Amino acid sequence: MRTLLAMGFALMMTVAGHASDAKKADLVDTAIAADQFKTLVAAVQAADLVETLKSPGPFTVFAPTDEAFAKLPEGTVETLLKPENKDQLVAVLTYHVVPGAVMSTDLAGKKLDAKTVQGQTIAVDATGSGVKINDANVVAADVAATNGVIHVIDTVILPK
């Protein structure tokens, strides 16, 4: 638990350090600047979703860190990045996105299901001391971008 809290604090500090830049950058450039999302950015590029995430939106992205992707079974990321698995990769990535800019203050004290761009719903639980998205913890919230907001999560969430 202490390790998770320390990691969350480190991520919040890293992302917060880029918050002033984020207001001038779209979701993709904000993720690149944070330097915690190399795997996510590579996946977005492989899925041809860069233009979408640079569009006006707005979108809310629950962004898994590189460490979150590293928790997946060995070979999962490499398999998803193969061109023949593009549809599956798009499904996984769009499951991390909801339409609109949803700030943490919009969620505080609530428990709800939110429809993702992928089409399925995610479970949002902001009734405790933190916020959970399915089984993932939000470790940094409200990273503003010109076309939406990023909430950093510690686990890759997968559609059913």
Image (cartoon, rainbow, N blue to C red):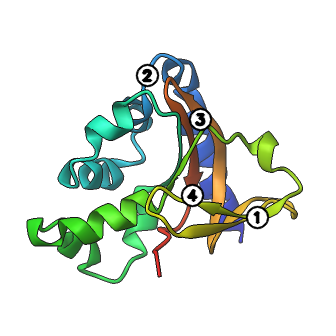
Residue 134 drawn at (x, y percent): 63, 72
Amino acid type at mark 3: Val
For disc 3, the marked residue is 143
Q: Are marks 4 and 2 in contact (CB under 8 Å)?
A: no
- The kind of secondary structure element at disc 3 is strand
Q: CA distance from mark 3 to mark 4?
A: 12 Å
On screen, residue 116 versus residue 142, left or right, reads left
On screen, residue 18 versus residue 36, left or right, reads right
For disc 2, the marked residue is 25
Which residue is pictured at 24% across the width and 51% down the height? 42
The residue mark sitting in front, 1 or 3, is 1
Residue 51 drawn at (x, y percent): 27, 36
Q: CA distance from mark 4 to mark 2?
A: 20 Å
Q: Are marks 1 and 3 in contact (CB under 8 Å)?
A: no
Which residue is pictured at 10% across the width and 71% down the height? 84
Q: CA distance from mark 3 to mark 2?
A: 11 Å
For disc 4, the marked residue is 153
Along the polypeptide, which appears first: circle 1 or circle 3? 1
Along the polypeptide, which appears first: circle 4 or circle 1? 1
Amino acid type at mark 2: Ala
Nearest the eye: 96 or 55: 55
For disc 1, the marked residue is 112
Q: CA distance from mark 1 to mark 3?
A: 21 Å
Nearest the eye: 17 or 48: 48
Which residue is pictured at 43% across the width and 27% down the height? 56
Residue 9 drawn at (x, y percent): 66, 48
- The kind of secondary structure element at disc 2 is loop
The answer, for residue 148, to whether it is visible in the render is yes
